Image (cartoon, grey):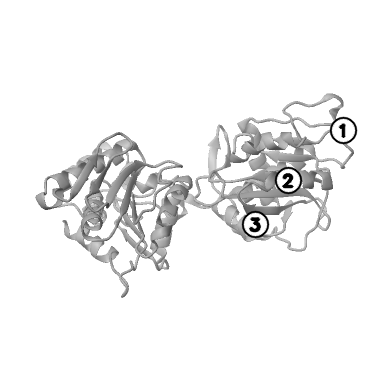
Amino acid sequence: MDPWQADVLHGALGEHADGSPAATEVAVIVPRQNGKGSILEAEALYSLFLTPARLLLWSAHEFKTAKEGFLRLVALVTNTDELRRKVKAVRQTTGEEGIELLDGSRVKFVARSRSSGRGFTGDEIFLDEAFALVSEQIAALFPTLAARSTRARIWYTSSAPHTDSAVLRKVCKRGRSGDAKRLAYFEWCAAPDADSGDVRAWLAANPAIGYRLSLEHTAAELDAMDEESFRLERLGIWHDDDFESVIDRRLWDRLKDSEAVIADPVAFAVDMPPDRGWTTIAAAGHSEQHEGRRHVEIVDRRRRSDWVVDRLVELYHRWAPCAIMIDARGPASSLIPALEAEGLRVTSEPVAGGEEIIVTTSASEMAAACGGFYDDVVHGSLVFRPTPELDAAAEAATQRPLGDQWAWSRQSGVDISPLVAVTLARHGLARFGRPAAARQEPAVLWG
């Protein structure tokens, strides 16, 4: 191994006196083609052949990348007599790639998805090309370590995070802070203000120059690539503030009022993250104490979703809301059939007499909801009763483009469903709010 690769393994594999890992997470952030894959190969061979590990999961953002890692490891094993004699099977079937030893230990290679890793109990997870990680994939893979907590370890290897690398950026920020007690963090990059043509910056960011990279090739990259790409991909330069929350925390904190009281008319909304681990119901109405301001709050938030339909029916009959909003393109849309079965009317058209309201499922409607909520925050025309879940969602909130507009992105690595729920509830109130009145039929409105 190169000296820097050996240093990473030496630093990452420290143990407590009882043999448990000192670091349960390891992150290696280094520009492309420096040899970070060899670190994973060495660790995989060590864990597979020299420790009691039973299952290793090696994942990449694309199948072809996971397949390449598989082929490299197979070559290392099959070309070494001492290792090859311990192999029971090398599985080449697409989707089943892996190596199984005679003692039952195995390494399995998967392309990351919402379901990859489910059903397995592993000792180590290798997350190659971690810049492409999204929160749903982490939700699928992390629980595989739960039953092996005494030696479980997860590895992140990647080049510098991109602007949309939400999960990896959070890992990197923890590593850079120095406060993460269970994270072994290794990063190579040039100084943010480095000159792109400075050879010293090339050497600082690329420990493999002189081993498998050359100054001549790096100079050729500088000539061929645009400067922004060169600084990210070869110098590893990224900025902590590239991915800051959309919502200014100072403005947000000024809107809090733990004593605030909601007044009619009210609108409700329900949302959940893609992994469906929690469901949030939010409300929006007018503020009793703050004239001219809308009031939003979390009404209920619990695990799973088996309680939601009954709760929404109860809230409907108690409050006669002007709207119950559900994002028709979001995870909570799966609740619609059950709501209809309870007699709640789901409509996308106005009904005769104007008793009901216009409902839309267009992307522009969600963009309007997010834009309206953001404007209320900036203008101070909102008040809310604070909860930790809503604060966390607002702090992590980022944007995804929708044409010339934007909506909240679920790729932040944090469950933002509390924020989505209050955003939709506020939109329902803004569009359809009017004094509560008797209805012939209930309605569930989806936006």
Q: Name the side, left or right, on which 328 lies relative to 266.
A: left
Residue in front for this viewpoint, 129 or 395: 129
Q: Residue 177: x percent and y percent?
A: 42, 65
Residues at badges 3 and 2 in contact (C-beta under 8 Å)? Answer: no
Q: Residue 171: x percent and y percent?
A: 41, 56
Report the residue at 69% width, 30% height from top.
360
Q: Residue 339: x percent and y percent?
A: 71, 37
Marked residue nearer the N-terminal end (2 or 1)? 2
Q: Nearer the viewer, mark 3 or mark 2?
A: 2
Marked residue nearer the N-terminal end (1 or 3)? 3
Q: CA distance from mark 3 to mark 2?
A: 32 Å
Q: CA distance from mark 2 to mark 1?
A: 20 Å
| Amino acid type, residue under disc 1 in the picture | Gln
Q: Find disc 2 in the rendering and name its residue.
A: 310
SS class, disc 1:
loop
| Amino acid type, residue under disc 3 in the picture | Trp
Report the residue at 57% width, 46% height from top.
276
Residue in front for this viewpoint, 2 or 256: 2
Q: Find disc 3 in the rendering and name its residue.
A: 252
Residue 74 placement: quadrant: top left
Q: CA distance from mark 1 to mark 3?
A: 39 Å
Q: Find disc 1 in the rendering and name its residue.
A: 440
